[in-house]
Amino acid sequence: MGKIELLEPGLAERLSREREKSWRRKLRREISVQQRLLIPRQRMPEQPPAQRIRNFLEVNLGYSLETAKKEAQRCLDCGYPGCVAGCPVAIDIPTFIKYIEASELERALEKIRETNGLPAICGRVCPQEIQCEKNCNLVKARKEPVAVGHLERFVADYLCLRSELGTQPGCVDSGREKIAVIGSGPAGLTVAADLARLGYRVTVFEALHISGGVLAYGIPEFRLPREILSSEINFIKSLGVEIKTNFIVGKTASLSDLRELGYSAFFLGTGAGLPGFMNIPGENLLGVYSANEYLTRVNLMKALRYPDFDTPAPSGHKAAVIGGGNVAMDSVRTALRLGAREAVIYYRRSKAEMPARKEEIKHAEEEGIIFNFLRVPVRFLGDEHGRLKGMVLQRLTLGEPDASGRPRPVPVPGSEFEVEVDLAVVAIGQNPNPLLITKVDGLNLGRWGNVEVNPDTMSSSLPGIYAGGDAVRGGATVILAMGDGRRAGRAIDKFLKKC
Amino acid sequence: MNRIRLSARLAPNTFWVEVEAHEIAASARPGQFVMVIPDKKGERIPLNIAHWDKNKGTIEMVFMSLGVSTRKLAAFKAGDFLEGVAGPLGRPAEMANFGQVLLIGGCYGVAGLYPVVRGLKENGNQVIFLAEARSRTYLYWDDRIRKVTDKFITMFRADCFSSGKDLSDIILGLRQESPQLARVIVMGCSYLLFTVSEITRSTGLKTLVNLNPIMVDGTGMCGACRVTVHGKTHFACVDGPEFDGHGVDWKEYFSRRKAFFNQEELALANFESKASDLKE
């Protein structure tokens, strides 16, 4: 568990000042701790599995106001809120939850937005079980943790989608420095929002024709409906942030071109847009896709609505997805929704090591996804037209822990066997997109082609150039990218004030 | 959104657009392409940049009208807007003084090579241009290109039968006439790229082909455009589009270009029925 004191100077004091306000003290007294402990965790209403595998509508349907207030009552408003320490952007979680309990939803949203520009998204895609909820003190009392993610989502949806709270008057000062943010994913949007709030003139450059980065091309609509994404992006635009799409920094213009245009600080949030392949025979057969291509076609290009939209979706009756992370879960559940009769995960470790969010694994299981653990493809097999017709798998066992601390998968000799497959999606991870970052003279890159930064300030080896998100981490999570964006925003502000 | 300044038919099935794109016009290099999104429901398709004008802030593309996206593009008129244009993408064609260079263009590749010709001339090369077309009716931009080349040859497939002279005779003939010929650069349909590579293979004459596989993002993010060259997988959008024609795995290339053949047929039928509904 992280220590609150270490997250941000003055944070612990701020939290306790909020906690001691009279309305909070009064609220704590209204229901006793014993009574609060008796309230069960409120279930998230879901679309039934048999129905949802035939559509791309969101699986989770959201809390009602009543359910949300009940869930908020479960929070004990404890003196040391471990949840905040577990949150990469240090949201004042107890305060926003207590505002829900007090029916002050606008204040709850305001509180979240102080540190998180994308609440409706984080409420949906954060791995709460290893962050805020893991640190919830209810867990120590052998209870289920407060559903922080569900509550965050509730507040954002309840207000943003219904009222002018979805926007905020801009506060950009036309005399201030110009800042270029490269990439409109979660890291870029966060740094843009934070700096615009401080009055800087921020331009976000996006290579694709739609903004949102991985939120737009990667995460499927059944996890993150696009109207939620656009409402969050509109909020950030309302702060005065300009987003330029179809602008590929490194191609359309270089960083030095932008410097000449008067940008005085840069944030590289260029993401992990380099798909990993296994480099095994047959990987270029028709029917083998990177998860990036598969998901981009469906989500960004709307192949799910083909032929109304022009981009076709890869089709397959027997779909195999290789990998065990969120991208693999998204791909396999997409294949099912696009009509695969059989959608199978092949993962080289066991269930316990799967990096995917717990809720995604649960949803996938309910939907009838087949999980095959300790298997890895060693070869793809094609027919005479170069189309995928099967693959050769090898069995693995778990050995000693590797550098990541997880047991290393060890091949079992002579254990190869064949399976029939006509669609394979490779979801074994992504590396930072090299398009821009390999072309900046003097920018230090690490072993995986990632931008090397000081983790406290996210500053790179070049003055005035900062980086964060998957460009630094490889394939990580939305919230870690946002945390990077926040730290970079603070550091850029300091950097420019000194100048 | 990018405004279309000019839209014209150059030959049966071959179309020319000039589009406003200031930043791209300022940074385009010979051999590069742009990703074009015709409308809100459109695909992203790669088109070679055939010309640009920094002062006007315009770029020009020439394309064949084959599938839904290119038909949509062909139907646009001056004053209409494209949903988006992004670029310039891909590595620019290699530029230096090589001596003598033979450029072979077919269909859209005649226009796509126009900037390459000019670049090579600026670098002091002697440039021979061979334009390949079905017949004279299909030839375009010949005056434009003739002006910047040292030698301009045409080869019409319709004439092959009467003259008995084919692509191989012409290329090997040129090779004999000009022993200082340093390289061949080809742009056009897959069959032309393949055929030229096969003709020059035994001569050892360096042959660069501009591959045009299926792409989605065009920035190296998806890997749809994987091609195998000398046994190694490359992404054509960022490692190419220019590759050694003698190293390309042509069987794989031809098959991957047809990846969505069935869906494309369906989309086209759908598009045409919608278009005819509109007419009625």
Image (cartoon, coloured by chain):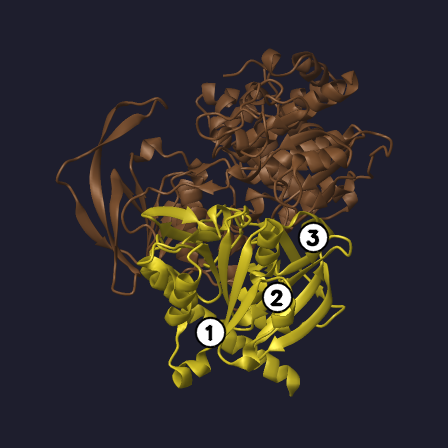
Residue A116: where, in percent of width, then height?
A: 66, 31
Closer-to-camera residue (A300/A87): A300
Residue at image position (56%, 22%) is A453
Is the Cβ of the residue at disc 3 closer than 8 Å to that at disc 2? Answer: no
| Furthest residue in direction left, as rendered | A414
The chain under label 1 reads: B
Residue A92: where, in percent of width, then height?
A: 65, 24
Image quadrant holding the N terminus of chain B, namely bottom right
Instruction: Note the chain letter of the yellow one.
Output: B
Is the Cβ of the residue at disc 1 closer than 8 Å to that at disc 2? Answer: no
Query: Would residue B152 appear left or right of A486 to someone viewing this image?
Result: left
Residue A235: where, in percent of width, then height?
A: 73, 42
Closer-to-camera residue (A462/A179): A462
Q: Which residue is mark 3?
A: B25
Residue A64: where, in percent of width, then height?
A: 61, 44
Q: Which residue is mark 1?
A: B266
Q: Amino acid at mark 2?
A: Ile
The residue tagged with tag 2: helix, strand or loop? helix
Q: CA distance from mark 1 to mark 2?
A: 38 Å
Q: Is there any visible trace of residue A101 in the rendered image?
A: no
Number of dots carrying numbers: 3
Q: Amino acid at mark 3?
A: Ala
Q: Is there any visible trace of residue B31 in the rendered image?
A: yes
Residue at image position (63%, 62%) is B148
Q: Which residue is mark 2?
A: B145
The numbered dot on residue B279 is none
Q: Colour of chain A?
A: brown
The residue tagged with tag 1: helix, strand or loop? helix
